[in-house]
Structures are given as structure tokens and as C-alpha cells.
Amino acid sequence: MSCSCCHTSKATSKLCPQCQQKGMAVSQQTMLHQVQFPDNQSITQGEYAFCANRDCEVGYFSASSMIPQALLRAFQSYQHAMLCHCFDISESDYRAALADGRAGAIKSFVVKQTKHKLCACEVRNPSGHCCLADFKRMEKAYDC
């Protein structure tokens, strides 16, 4: 299932200037909603990427600028491994649900809300991408 609410971010050929990890293309809309005031007012047009490395200080970067993770609204939740930013589900919450058999109901809820376009991935998730693939990734890792 793919998210119908937003475009899935894709890895770019751009490397984070600090950690050298490949960035994920991110929309201007995501950045404007994620970068805290007043810094969001100084974002210039251009192609930006999101650094998904939690150990890196960079949040977004372009060829000419860098925005630190600490300036992102979702910085604290991102540092605490949120799985679903729209509905406030952490990776540890979902891991516990996988262990005690509640994961299906949680995932069904998120899928249902996504189908009805009641999620806000592009503005709530600092990467701007939908979390449904992350649920699958965690389920695969749990089965191993």
C-alpha cells in the first residue's frame, strides 16, 4: 500500500555535507512546516534534501545552505525514533505491539486514516514521506 496523501521521498545523489549519507529529496512545503519560526522565513528556493541520520546535526541541506536538526519542530520526536508522526506512534510502541499481538490494529488504523487522506505526512514527518513502508520494515525486522 502506498500513501495517497503525499509523494514518497526518494534518495538523491546529494550527500549530507556533515555525515556524507545520501539525502532524501524534500518539498518546500515540508521544510516550511518543519523549520521553526523565525528560521522558516529565511528558507530560500532550491532543491533541498533531508538527512535521515539521527546522529548527524544536519536536518536539511542544499548546495548552498544547511539547516540543523535542532531547528526542526519534530526534532525531539525524530530523536526518539517516531514511526508515525501523524498519529504519534514511536518505534518502541510498535515493537511492543508486535510482541503482544496489537500491531495489526495499530497498522490498520494508520492505513485507514491514510486511505481517507486524514494523515499529514508531508508536514508532520520531517522527511516528508509516508510511514507505511516503515511499518513493513519493522515487521520484517521483528520476524527475523
Image (cartoon, rainbow, N blue to C red):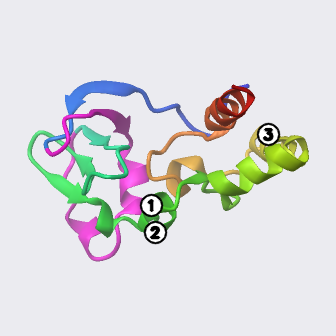
Residue type indicated by callout 3: Val
Which mark is on residue 111? 3
Q: Which residue is mark 1?
A: 79
Q: Position of residue 105 (x, y in %)?
A: 90, 46
Point out residue 14 in the picture as x, y percentages from the top left corner. 21, 29
Quarter of the figure with the C terminus:
top right
- Residue 42 badge: none
The segment highlighted magenta reads 18-46
Disc 2/disc 3 C-alpha distance (Å)? 25 Å
Q: Say if residue 132 shows up in the picture.
A: yes
Residue at figure coordinates x 35%, y 71% from the top left: 36
Asked if one can make out residue 106 in the rendered structure from this viewpoint, the answer is no
Q: Amino acid at mark 2?
A: Gln
Of helix, strand and loop, which one carries label 3? Answer: helix
What residue is rendered at 78% in x and 46% in y?
A: 110
**Tag 2–tag 1 contact (CB < 8 Å):** yes
Does residue 102 appear left or right of residue 80 in this picture? right
Q: Is residue 139 left or right of residue 128?
A: right
128 in relation to 132, above or below: below
Whichever of callouts 2 and 3 sits on the residue coming sooner in the sequence is: 2
Give me the disc on residue 76. Answer: 2
Residue 122 vs residue 138, the one in the foreground: 138
Residue sitting nearer the eye, 21 or 114: 21
Above or below residue 129? Residue 85 is below
